[in-house]
Image (cartoon, rainbow, N blue to C red):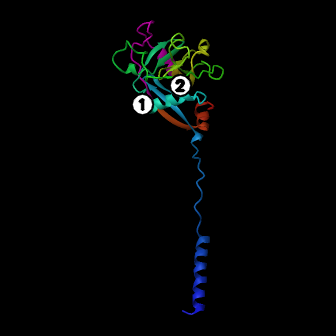
Amino acid sequence: MKLKGILWLLVASLCLFSCKDEEETPTPADTSNTDPTATDTLIEVSTDHGTMTMYMYKGTPKHRANFHKLVGEGFYDDTEFHRIIPNFMIQGGDPLSKDADRSNDGTGGPGYTIPAEIDANKYPHVLGAVAAARLGDTQNPQRASSGSQFYIVVSETGTAHLNGAYTVFGRVIKNTSVAETIVQQPRIDTRTNRPQDRIKMQMKFVVKTAAEIKTEYGFDVE
């Protein structure tokens, strides 16, 4: 092929690729928000008396991480609210409450405790507060929390006398009325405060953005 013909082919090829690039529309960049910090994890607690939604505070990271871990493992499923005291609180989360023996309910756990993360100014015992149960000060001067047992405040005015003594690590942000209904159930006696009928729970995660939580629950996440 003559030199003139070769040069013509090169020019034609360059023009072809150049025109193809100009005609194609480039794929737009993915601008969707994939930042995991843009979402938050809520926990739905379902019972025969209804379903309530809880939020775990980021300011109590050890308790938050532990609770999320246990929920993810299904630890709480079929445990019971084994202790109910009107105008005070409901308590649950003991794995021993799954079996037929109710006499030991309230004495079990996952085999470990959690260091206290008490901040009474930031997280007081208000209606719907979720706090960790624990052994008393004599046995537990560090006020370390139970690894799984928790209670929910049902008093309309809160339980301020517990502030500074127990770790509040979450709050019911939807349907506190469910906890209030549970606490009104008949009890076997006022010594153990066990409900006559067993009140089982199931837990699952619900993922929402901070904006969705504000809109749907009227709650500002940290």
Numbered mark located on residue 74 in the image: 1
Residue at image coords 43%, 21%: 109
Question: Going by the image, does 106 lie left or right of 1?
Answer: left
Mark 2 vs mark 1: give the one in front. Answer: 1
Which quarter of the rendered picture does the N terminus lie within? bottom right
Task: Indicate whether 120 appears above or below 222.
Answer: above
Label pair 2/1, CB-CB below 8 angstroms = no
Task: Indicate whether 56 appears above or below 134.
Answer: below
Quadrant of res 154: top right
Q: Which residue is mark 2?
A: 175
Which quarter of the rendered picture does the C terminus lie within? top right
- Part of the protein shown in magenta: 178-203
Q: Give the residue type that dot 1 points to.
A: Gly
Numbered mark located on residue 200 in the image: none
Residue at image coords 42%, 13%: 195
Magenta segment's dominant SS is loop
Residue 113 placed where, x, y %?
A: 49, 22
